[in-house]
Amino acid sequence: ITKTQAKLNIYELVDNQFELRESKVNQGNQFIVQLLGVNAEQFRQLFILPQGEFKKFLQSNSKDKQSILRTLFNSERFDEIRHLLLENVKQEKVQIENRYTQIENLWNDIDTFNNDELALYKELESSQTDKMIEKFPQFNDYGCKILKSFEEAKNKITKELDD
């Protein structure tokens, strides 16, 4: 048995003449992979499928199938879109969490004026924004009542001092 060195010549038809493109095996293999978009194993699987080896394709591992189908249907763009959408969702979740933190801080800053009913409302979670909005007028009304009573007391004291 005599072994011969592997040889690969790739020619390209240019102006009705064949020009040598690649003459080294490794560079030729790279050229073919770049041209076809599949490696040798994927190429075999793609062209064996129509020849009755579909069962073998179906039984091959998921990674091999994914790779072949991605190549055939150019689905990398969908993976890129999926990745981009996941990143956007992650960023939006962070922003939403930050907003809820801001709402919680502002809600905690609201004074209950030592009123038990208002103190009970303050136990609402920051995610219950609808209920918070519903209760804001009660805090405002109670604050206005206190302000009015202080103003009346101030006016009374001012009047007494003036007399």
Image (cartoon, rainbow, N blue to C red):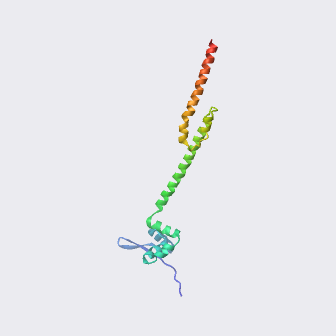
Pick whichever, 25 or 49, lies toward us. 49
Q: Position of residue 40 (x, y in %)?
A: 49, 73
* Quarter where residue 50 is shown: bottom left
Residue 134, above or below 150: below
Identify the residue shown where x is 56% and y is 32%: 140
Question: Does residue 87 appear in the picture of this structure?
Answer: yes
Which residue sits furthest bottom? 1
Which residue sits furthest front? 117
Q: Count the numbered circles shown.
A: 0
Identify the residue shown where x is 51% and y is 57%: 83
Q: Position of residue 80 (x, y in %)?
A: 49, 58
The answer to whether residue 156 is left or right of residue 39 is right
- Quadrant showing the C terminus: top right
Pick whichever, 30 or 4, lies toward us. 30
Pick whichever, 29 or 127, lies toward us. 127
Q: Position of residue 67 (x, y in %)?
A: 50, 67
The answer to whether residue 67 is left or right of residue 145 is left
Which residue sits furthest top? 163
Which residue sits furthest left? 16
Residue 137, above or below 81: above
Residue 66, above or below 145: below
- Quadrant showing the N terminus: bottom right
Identify the residue shown where x is 48% and y is 73%: 57
Question: Does residue 40 appear in the picture of this structure?
Answer: no
Pick whichever, 126 or 30, lies toward us. 126
Identify the residue shown where x is 61% and y is 15%: 159
Q: Position of residue 155 (x, y in %)?
A: 60, 18
Residue 122, above or below 14: above
